[in-house]
Image (spheres, helix red, strand yellow):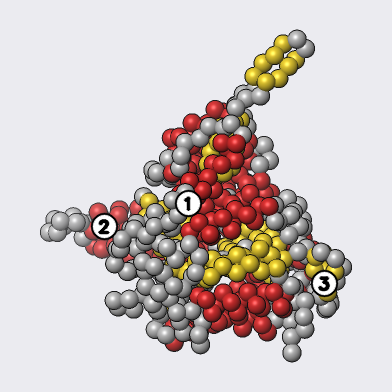
Amino acid sequence: MAGSNKGIHHNRWLSYSTVLAFLVLSACSNTPESEVSGTPANSEDVIAGLQIVDCLLPGQLRKLGNMAYMSPRRPIKTTAADCRIRGGEYVAYDRADYKTALKVWLPSAEDGDAEAQLSVGEIFEKGLGTEPNYEVAVFWYKKAADQGNKSALFNLGTLYEQGLGVEQDRLQAINYYRQAWGMPEDSLIYQETAQREQDGLRAELAAQLKSKDQQMALLDKQVASLKKKVSSNAGKVAVTDISPSDELATLQQLLASVQNDRASVERKLSTIPKLRTPALSMPAAAPAAGGDGIKLDGMDFGRYYALVIGNRDYSMLDDLATPLNDAKEIGEILEKQYGFQVQLLLNSDRLTVMQAINELHSVLTENDNLLIYYAGHGSMVNVGDRDTGYWLPVNADAPPNDAFWVSNEFVSNHLGRLQAKRVLVIADSCYGGLLSSAPGQLFLGKGRESDNPEYVKYKLPRKSRLLMSSGGDKPVIDEGGDGHSVFARELINALKSNKGLLSAPDLYAQIREPVKHQAELNNFVQEPVYKIIKGAGHEVGDFFFVPTTKVN
């Protein structure tokens, strides 16, 4: 909207509903730069202590017989406060500088430590103050992957899927994902996903072959025609800069090049293996709450927590219209219909949001579910060829002053430390999709996965770190949903109307097109995204909504 962004969610802040990561970001701020807003005198020290840093712990005094010696110093990722308590060494905000980060991790990586090799790979992939070096990142990821490091295997998959540092190869990406998540090669889910990708690749290569055949047929005709022309002009003096003989030679070279290209495509096509894809159905069952967790059809889905954040009234930015309505209604649905324990944060400042996320560590256990929902202003900063996203709390300054913003890296770093089994972040704000650098999911099914018993039983015991964003790396609309954002309205409708087990991919599939359509009716282009949160410990799990009350 010209002159104002009250119709656009640039910075939507987060309200905490315990431990289910449902982040909804929905605002983008382009208001004039304003004066720096204040915070409590000691808040910056507290915030600095909540940052995840590369910490080098001191060596331990050990004894072997009568001999005492110091063990090597050990690098870990932890909060700055925890590093200080444990007597560790770190450079303040060293996650923004690859040189200081490498100083911590590289010696252990060179000594063969897989976790250190993974960290070095991540440093080169992210760039951290310089341009990313994907080729070197691949080198270190492969060293860690050779030792069975799951995160390194997954990161390799994302690079192969995007063609960063390596030639793009989606089938290789799927295979790396399979290994990272402990799937056997005969896994039905793996075979189904690979089959779908193989079918698409076959169709693509077949289309390329057809195009090459058409090019070769056309070139054959041109070559035949030129041969006649050269024959009829034999002995005559050329009157043009390019003689028919030269044209013929050029055409024959081009024909040979197309033939080589066609042969290369044919070789790729011949190497694609064939897999079987079984058909399964999910038996109907009624969910019921039992013990400390929610149970369905003999399966324990664990406890559900939600941190729901809604920021509408900003001190230094334009106010938004809908985040409070969105956060309140979504929090109520999660609590009453799905049995979530909800912590609601409305109009929260930077310190409140960061502390709420940090406190999740003391609440969640290994079989819990966390949904974080964030609705508010969001913003973006370009660093080299990378874009970094931020949530903007109510005390945030206008761009480019990011002193009181909450970075996506802060959120993803803490998600990586949580014990919760399943985490979903739903972000309804501008640039919310930048919370993850992973590409779109290759393991999204063709149909409704919630009805597939093989899918549910395989996914349920495995960790998940997932992001559903209202608009990817683009601005999103704040209104247009009868008192809600267009994204929140469709999300509310889908959750309210659901009567059975609902997976996050199925929820995304249900709201994606309606959000696009409603945005178009408001003369706006917006498309939600769904993907893995890279570097936060995802292990091919999923997130499931299990109604605990019947829907009329």
> Mark 2 or 3 closer to N-term?
2
> Mark 1 or 3 closer to N-term?
1
Report the amino acid beneath label 2: Glu
The answer to whether 128 appears left or right of 505 in the picture is left
- Tell me, for residue 289, which label it has, or none: 3
Q: Position of residue 445 (x, y in %)?
A: 66, 69
Report the amino acid beneath label 1: Ser
Which circle, 2 or 3, is nearer the viewer? 3
Quadrant hosting residue 258: bottom left
- Tell me, for residue 542, which label it has, or none: none
Q: Answer yes or no: is residue 215 visible.
A: yes
Q: Regarding mark 3 in the picture, which secondary structure is present there? A: strand
Q: Pointer 1: residues within 10 angstroms few (<14), some, or many (20+)?
A: some
Residue at screen point 74% across, 85% down: 551
In the figure, 103 relative to 552: above or below? Answer: above
Q: Where is residue 268 in the image (x, y as percent from the top left)?
A: 56, 55
Residue at screen point 45% across, 54% down: 40
Residue extending farthest right: 298
The reply to whether dot 1 and dot 3 touch (C-beta < 8 Å) is no
> Mark 1 or 2 closer to N-term?
1
Q: Position of residue 202 (x, y in %)?
A: 58, 64
- Real-space Cα separation, disc 1 to disc 3, in angstroms: 41 Å
Disc 2: which residue: 247
Q: Answer yes or no: is residue 476 visible.
A: no
Nearer to the camera, 117 or 311 = 311
Nearer to the camera, 415 or 217 = 415
Residue at screen point 60% across, 27% down: 58
Disc 1: which residue: 43
